Image (tube, rainbow, N blue to C red):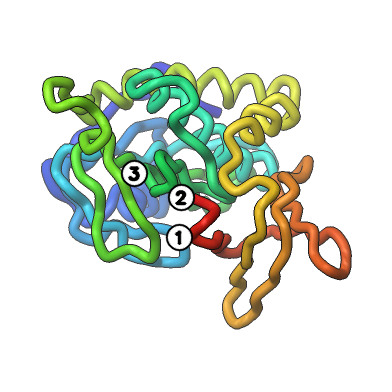
């Protein structure tokens, strides 16, 4: 699903790369293309939350089409998380990045990157997909609902943080490889790679779904990418929700 030869378009300023991807798709322009913003004025994360843009961070959306089923498209979020984590590790050291279900990358217990998917049906079948993510390279957004961190704050003073396009160039082959592997052999290898980095695995958590809250212990992720939660009434499979971990969980 990921085309290693897709071109890159760069915007000095735009409302949001994922909004631009949707606009293009709605007028029949489907890529494949990478849309990169130096600054965003209306970036958003999960459930429409604002995602503050800071100069020097990577703000990217990949727009493409696919005939793969929706459940398989959703697995791209896991592939992107693992690819971002692998790229961060290559910069600051192996084992540094962890993955919080469903779509956050953590470093030192704080959010370093977030991932978002948008999609729509094509008239003749198949779908267009916008795979978006932001990586805190130079600065960490403030006033979010969780702690954030940037690579710049971790690296030694004399070691520059990677430029956004440099990070993207390091990320693309990893993402392409995981996408191709998942498409050819299924989710299990990616699932295992994700679990090796799982943030909060085995710890108590609260899952917030609107007004509903489910409490339990994180046990893993299912073969479909659902969060496996062991509760007082047995194992639950969570398809969507916000995962809240106690402060002691790191």
Q: Is residue 203 visible?
A: yes
Residue at image coords 27%, 41%: 150
Mark 3 or mark 2: whose residue is earlier in sequence = 2
Crowding at dot 3, Cα within 10 Å, few <14 / some 14-19 / many 20+, comes out as many
Crowding at dot 1, Cα within 10 Å, few <14 / some 14-19 / many 20+, comes out as some
Q: In terms of secondary structure, where does tag 3 sit?
A: strand
Residue at image coords 33%, 63%: 144
Q: In terms of secondary structure, where does tag 1 sit?
A: helix
**Is residue 58 or residue 21 the one in the foreground?**
58
Q: Position of residue 35 (x, y in %)?
A: 29, 38
Which residue is labeled 2 in the image?
116
Specify the quadrant that holds the N terminus: top right
Image mark count: 3
Q: Position of residue 6 (x, y in %)?
A: 38, 23
Q: CA distance from mark 1 to mark 3?
A: 12 Å
Which residue is labeled 3 in the image?
134
Crowding at dot 2, Cα within 10 Å, few <14 / some 14-19 / many 20+, comes out as many
Q: Position of residue 117 (x, y in %)?
A: 49, 49
Q: Is residue 71 left or right of residue 237?
A: left
Q: In terms of secondary structure, where does tag 2 sit?
A: strand
Question: Height in image: 81 above or below 21?
Answer: above
Q: CA distance from mark 1 to mark 2?
A: 7 Å
């Amino acid at each position: 699903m990921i085309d290693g030869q897709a071109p890159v378009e760069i915007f000095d300023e735009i409302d949001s790369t994922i909004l631009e991807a949707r606009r293009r798709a709605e007028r029949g322009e489907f890529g494949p293309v990478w849309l990169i913003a130096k600054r965003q004025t209306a970036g958003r994360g999960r459930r429409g939350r604002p995602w503050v843009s800071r100069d020097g961070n990577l703000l990217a959306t990949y727009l493409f089409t696919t005939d793969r089923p929706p459940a398989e498209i959703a697995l791209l979020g896991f592939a992107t998380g693992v690819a971002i984590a692998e790229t961060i590790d290559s910069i600051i050291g192996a084992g540094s990045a962890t993955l919080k279900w469903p779509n956050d990358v953590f470093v030192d217990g704080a959010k370093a990157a977030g991932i978002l998917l948008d999609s729509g049906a094509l008239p003749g079948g198949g779908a267009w997909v916008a795979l978006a993510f932001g990586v805190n390279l130079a600065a960490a957004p403030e006033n979010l609902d969780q702690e954030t961190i940037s690579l710049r704050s971790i690296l030694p003073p004399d070691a520059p943080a990677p430029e956004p396009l440099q990070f993207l160039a390091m990320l693309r082959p990893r993402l392409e490889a995981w996408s191709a592997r998942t498409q050819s052999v299924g989710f299990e290898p990616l699932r295992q790679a994700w679990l090796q980095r799982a943030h909060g695995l085995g710890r108590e958590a609260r899952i917030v779904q609107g007004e509903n809250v489910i409490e339990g212990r994180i046990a893993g992720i299912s073969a479909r990418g659902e969060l496996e939660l062991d509760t007082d009434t047995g194992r639950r499979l969570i398809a969507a929700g916000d995962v809240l971990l106690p402060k002691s969980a790191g």
